[in-house]
Image: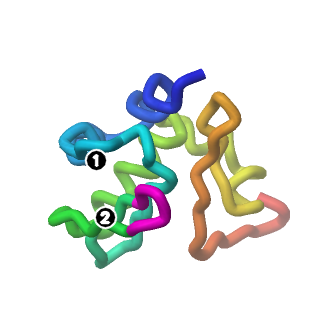
């Protein structure tokens, strides 16, 4: 399954449009988003910084989109540090998660 058909529907339009503007998306290996930093794309092990600064609101929108707007469905996977995207792809997630009484 081509990654584009799996990934584009799971991105915010803002991030998807940046990716679409790249010349050689067939060599895309990673999309890196860190809060407070520019969005990075990795092609053939080479990092490309974009102009888009990923603030907290953008990060929240991207996480919601990656989860298909159903973040609650992926609590177990999030606790393990990833979100399944489909087609064998996944989004790595790191940060802090607070659990109370196993929830």
x and y percentages locating residue 99 in the rendered image: 73, 68
Q: Which residue carries the number 1 mark?
A: 15
Tag shown at residue 39: 2
Asked whether residue 99 is drawn in magenta, I would say no
The residue positioned 44% from the left and 46% from the top of the image is: 27
x and y percentages locating residue 5 in the rendered image: 46, 23
Considering depth in this image, is 90 or 30 the residue closer to the camera?
30
| C-alpha separation, residue under disc 1 versus residue under disc 2 | 8 Å
x and y percentages locating residue 47 in the rendered image: 37, 68
Quarter of the picture containing the C terminus is: bottom right
The image quarter containing residue 46 is bottom left
Q: Please say if 81 is above or below 68.
A: below
Rendering colour mode: rainbow
Looking at the image, residue 96 sits to the left or right of residue 9; the answer is right
Q: Which residues are magenta?
A: 42-46
- Marks 1/2 in contact by CB < 8 Å: the verdict is yes
Considering depth in this image, is 8 or 60 the residue closer to the camera?
8
Local secondary structure at mark 2: strand
Looking at the image, residue 25 sits to the left or right of residue 21; the answer is right
x and y percentages locating residue 81 in the rendered image: 69, 62
User: Which SS does the magenta portion mostly show?
Assistant: strand
Mark nearer the N terminus (1 vs 2):
1
Local secondary structure at mark 1: helix
The residue positioned 49% from the left and 56% from the top of the image is: 30
Tag shown at residue 96: none
Quarter of the picture containing the N terminus is: top right
């Amino acid at each position: 399954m081509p990654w584009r058909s799996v990934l584009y529907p799971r991105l915010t339009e803002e991030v998807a449009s940046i990716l679409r503007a790249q010349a050689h998306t067939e060599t895309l290996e990673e999309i890196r988003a860190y809060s407070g930093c520019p969005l990075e794309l990795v092609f053939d092990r080479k990092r490309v910084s974009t102009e888009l600064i990923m603030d907290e609101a953008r990060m929240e929108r991207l996480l919601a989109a990656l989860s298909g707007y159903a973040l609650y469905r992926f609590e177990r996977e999030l606790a393990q540090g990833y979100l399944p995207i489909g087609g064998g792809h996944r989004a790595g997630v790191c940060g802090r998660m607070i659990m109370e009484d196993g929830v």
